[in-house]
Structures are given as structure tokens and as C-alpha cells.
Image: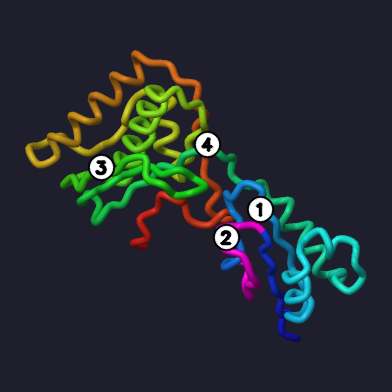
Amino acid sequence: MANKKQKFYVVWQGRKTGIFETWDEASAQVNGFAGAQFKSFGTRAEAKAALAQGRNVRRTHANYRATPSARREETRLSGINLPIVPSYCADTACRGNPGVIEYRAVKTESREPLFARGPFPEGTSNIGEFLAIVETLEILKRQNDRAPVYSDSRNAIAWVAAKRCKTQLERNARNAELFERIDRAQEWLRTNRYPNRILKWRTRDWGENPADYGRK
């Protein structure tokens, strides 16, 4: 079987601009970036010329017309819905299960931190994900910010909707502070309304959640 032909990805507008040899590298620059502009090319020479001349020129100039396969690739990539921006992402890190947990939230586009909590002994990933979402909602309500919140945990999203942390972990002296946070989070959900949508982060399409700790 013939090897798959190399593609070269030009990013005109993104976190970094330039030519990238894999979609994983290119997508890290454009996913979640408002107004991202990018295209795949069949050769490095085409990519270099298009990068130099700019996106608008390549739309009309025959020298920068992509191959049919490259055009199909661009159509496929542009069809992937990008995350809504502005928005926020919440995530957790857990060493062990149960184990030491941390959780935080960041702005999706810039990865600017909103807050970070922990470490807390004897927690679980689901607890961390739940608390990360709720504490993000609390802060956004105080700031009158209606932006959506992303999480890659279906369980945590469901728990927030139910207004209850459905963990099976037992409360004890080591995790007392964590359970105090759970109690406060549940009470806040019961007594507050918020306009923010809570959305599932699409890791397969967009790469890792921007709030991810990078410890996998």
C-alpha cells in the first residue's frame, strides 16, 4: 500500500502562524482561536508561496490553487465546529483514584487562568471536574459574564445539572476540606440560577482541553 501523501498546513491567523507538517501541530494553533485562517497544501512549495502572499491572494491566484485532495481536506477541516469563544474551560488533575487532586479554569482562547485550586488529598477526578465547573459558574455570575463553560467530563456535567455531586467516595478526616467545598457547591447550585451553558469539550476534534494539566 502506498504511503499517504504528505500535506503541509498553512496557518495565516492562529496562536502561531507558519507552515506545519501535521494536522496535530496546525490544529493546536487554530482550535478555539477566533477568526482562525488555515489551509492544507500538497507540497511545501505551494504552502510557502501561499504563506508569503497571504490568504486573500491564494483564493484567486492560479499559482496557489490547492490540489483536489487538498481542497477536500480543507473542506473537511473547516466543517469541524470550533469551540465557542469567548468561553471558559474547566478541568482537573488527579494522582491516584482516589488521590491528590487539583482543579482549575482558564479562558479558552488565551488560556489565561481564571482560578486554580488545590492540591487536596484523597479526591477523585469526577469530584474535581464537578467543583471546577461550579466554581467557574460562581465567578462568572459575580462578573456578569454569560460565556459558556466547557468540560470534558460527562459525569461532572450531569452532576451539575442534577445539582448534586454523586460521588461514592466516603467523607473522612483527610478529605474533609474537599467535602466542605462539595457542600458549598451543591448549596450554591440549589440557590442560584446562571445563564451560562455547560458544554462538552470535543477532545477528538479539538485536542486537549485548554485547562488540562498535561500530566497524562
Check residue 150 for magenta coloring. Answer: no
Where is residue 76 shown, x and y percent of the image?
A: 75, 57
| Mark 1 in CB contact with mark 4 (< 8 angstroms) | no
Mark positioned earlier in the residue sequence (1 or 3): 1
Mark positioned earlier in the residue sequence (3 or 4): 3
The quarter holding residue 166 reads top left
Where is residue 118 shown, x and y percent of the image?
A: 22, 45
- The crowd level at tag 4 (other Cα within 10 Å; few <14, some 14-19, many 20+) is some
**Numbered range of the magenta stretch:** 13-23
Residue type at mark 4 is Leu
Report, in whole angstroms, how far the alpha carbon at label 1 lies from the one at label 2: 8 Å
Report, in whole angstroms, how far the alpha carbon at label 1 lies from the one at label 3: 32 Å
Mark positioned earlier in the residue sequence (1 or 4): 1
Residue marked by disc 1: 36
- The crowd level at tag 1 (other Cα within 10 Å; few <14, some 14-19, many 20+) is some
Mark 1 or 4, closer to the camera:
1
Residue marked by disc 4: 199
The furthest residue to the front: 53
| Mark 1 in CB contact with mark 2 (< 8 angstroms) | yes
Residue type at mark 1 is Ala
Mark positioned earlier in the residue sequence (4 or 2): 2
Where is residue 211 shown, x and y percent of the image?
A: 41, 49
- The crowd level at tag 3 (other Cα within 10 Å; few <14, some 14-19, many 20+) is some
For label 3, the SS is: strand
Report, in whole angstroms, how far the alpha carbon at label 1 lies from the one at label 4: 21 Å
| Mark 3 in CB contact with mark 4 (< 8 angstroms) | no
Residue marked by disc 2: 29
Q: Tell me: 68 left or right of 48.
A: right
For label 2, the SS is: helix
Which residue occupies 48% across, 56% down?
208
